[in-house]
């Protein structure tokens, strides 16, 4: 992870749109996919463990807190999906524009 982070060479400071600005960079894509590929697994483990131990908790307040952590862990899974989607979107856009260019070329050459 540290190597991928170092490979990213920011050209300017972009505090508001860093993710979308660098989403085309292969090093950033690998970093984000690795990070958000492991993060959801940890969140799922946390949610399952907290839910399991909430059942056996001796005090209702502890059980409530563990269930609340479970809800938070599940909620952050949505964040992970959004971030992975932001990295994958440029790939999908370039693939669709490539197919549009090919279709246009086939139409002008009379092959379609």
Image (cartoon, helix red, strand yellow):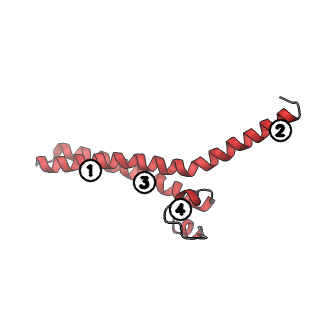
Q: Which residue bears the numbered disc 2?
A: 105
User: Could you tell me how far apart the alpha carbons at marks 4 and 2 are, in whole angstroms?
Assistant: 35 Å
Q: Which residue bears the numbered disc 3?
A: 39
The tag earlier along the polypeptide, 1 or 4, is: 4
- Residue beneath the point at 25% across and 44% down: 51
Q: Measured from the top left, where is residue 89 in percent x and y?
A: 58, 47
User: Could you tell me how far apart the alpha carbons at marks 4 and 3 are, in whole angstroms?
Assistant: 20 Å
Please state which of residues 17 and 47 is positioned toward the viewer in this rendering. Answer: 17
In the displayed structure, 75 sits above or below 35; it is: above
Q: Which element type, helix, strand or loop, lies under badge 4?
A: helix
Q: Measured from the top left, where is residue 63 in percent x and y?
A: 17, 47
Look at the image and tell me whether residue 108 can be seen.
yes
The extreme front residue here reads 16
Residue 69 image label: 1
- Residue beneath the point at 45% across and 54% down: 38
Please state which of residues 49 and 77 is positioned toward the viewer in this rendering. Answer: 77
Q: Which residue bears the numbered disc 4?
A: 18
User: Could you tell me how far apart the alpha carbons at marks 2 and 3 are, in whole angstroms?
Assistant: 43 Å
4 lies left or right of 55: right
* Quadrant, the C terminus: top right
């Amino acid at each position: 992870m540290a190597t991928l982070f170092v490979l990213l060479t920011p050209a300017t400071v972009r505090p508001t749109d860093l993710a979308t600005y660098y989403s085309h960079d292969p090093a950033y894509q690998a970093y984000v996919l690795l990070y958000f590929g492991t993060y959801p697994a940890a969140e799922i483990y946390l949610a399952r463990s907290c839910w399991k131990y909430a059942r056996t908790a001796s005090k209702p307040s502890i059980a409530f807190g563990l269930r609340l952590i479970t809800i938070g862990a599940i909620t952050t899974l949505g964040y992970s999906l959004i971030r992975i989607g932001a990295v994958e979107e440029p790939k999908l856009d370039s693939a669709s524009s490539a197919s549009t260019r090919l279709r246009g070329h086939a139409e002008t050459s009379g092959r379609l």
